[in-house]
Image (cartoon, helix red, strand yellow):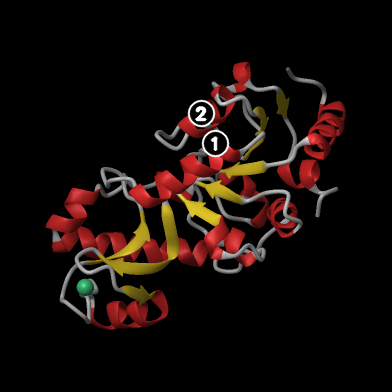
């Protein structure tokens, strides 16, 4: 059910007050207020090039060079981005013990930057602020990779095993991280209020979690600028900026 936004925000806070286990689920929309572009929106720098699929990255040195070149260019677009009111509100829910954790589709690390401990965040699509070896899993820091890449033009390889090093994000065609999927499912099953903030719910399997929560008896709230296909099953749809909608919590 949808009201005008002022009524909807009041309803949202009434529902939050009544809930005992709140689980947030966030997408790109929560970070746009921090200046991180939504990669699917028109004009986004992400839309200029076709994404490099995972198998091409693994197979082709040229694809890896191109991927790393794009990655560092994109990083420069939002180098100064910090958490906003929406991130801080969700951090407050966790700090106050009202939420056991949150699930995010974002790779921007802004939930961690808002003060939420790593072990309370499930990153379904990985994290773009570091890299890992695809063979041995060793973590590689971008601050070390970038200057070496820019000096040599060679894609990074693992100092431990020589394997292919990739940004710690999930690419098109790459398997979803099983441990994160299980943690997300567990959190979803604990929720009595499932709070979607800034996701259009079009990327699967991530977008199944609100449906699972609803089927499990949780209330479903969707705060998003645009309509989503799951609005019809939501108990409340809030068509407002996330920062404004959640600000009273922060
Ligand atoms: Zn390795």
- How far from the left and from the top, in percent, is residue 165? 25, 68
Q: Quick one: 39 or 91, which is closer to the camera?
A: 91
Q: Name the residue at 34% across, 63% down.
A: 167
For the C terminus, the image quarter is bottom right
* Picture quadrant of residue 244: top right
- Quadrant of ligand 1: it is bottom left
Circles 1 and 2, Cβ within 8 Å, touching? The answer is yes
For residue 155, side relative to residue 104 (left or right): left
Residue in view at x 29 percent, y 59 percent: 67
Q: Position of residue 145 (x, y in %)?
A: 33, 78
Q: Nearer the viewer, residue 218 or 66?
A: 218
Q: Which residue is mark 2?
A: 212
Q: Which mark is residue 189?
A: 1
Q: Earlier in the sequence, mark 1 or mark 2?
A: 1
Mark 2 element type = helix
Query: Looking at the rendered structure, which numbered label has been put on residue 13?
Result: none
Looking at the image, residue 181 lies above or below residue 116: above
């Amino acid at each position: 059910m949808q009201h005008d936004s002022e009524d909807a925000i009041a309803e949202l806070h009434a529902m939050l007050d009544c809930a005992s286990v709140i689980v947030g689920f966030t997408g790109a929309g929560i970070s746009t207020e921090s200046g991180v572009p939504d990669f699917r929106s028109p004009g986004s720098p992400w839309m200029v090039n076709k994404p490099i699929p995972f198998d091409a990255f693994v197979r082709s040195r040229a694809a890896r060079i191109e991927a790393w070149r794009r990655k560092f260019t994109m990083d420069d677009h939002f180098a100064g981005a910090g958490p906003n009111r929406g991130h801080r509100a969700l951090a407050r829910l966790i700090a106050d013990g009202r939420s056991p954790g949150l699930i995010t589709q974002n790779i921007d690390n802004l939930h961690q930057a808002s003060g939420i401990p790593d072990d309370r965040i499930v990153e379904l699509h990985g994290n773009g602020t570091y890299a890992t070896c695809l063979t041995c899993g060793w973590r590689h820091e971008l601050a070390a990779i970038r200057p070496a890449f820019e000096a040599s033009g060679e894609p990074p390889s693992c100092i431990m095993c020589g394997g292919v090093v990739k940004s710690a994000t999930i690419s098109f065609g790459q398997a979803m991280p099983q441990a994160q999927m299980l943690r997300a499912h567990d959190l979803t099953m604990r929720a009595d209020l499932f709070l979607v903030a800034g996701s259009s719910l079009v990327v699967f399997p991530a977008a199944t979690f609100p449906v699972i929560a609803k089927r499990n008896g949780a209330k479903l709230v969707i705060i998003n600028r645009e309509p989503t296909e799951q609005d019809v099953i939501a108990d409340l749809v809030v068509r407002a900026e996330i920062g404004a909608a959640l600000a009273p919590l922060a």
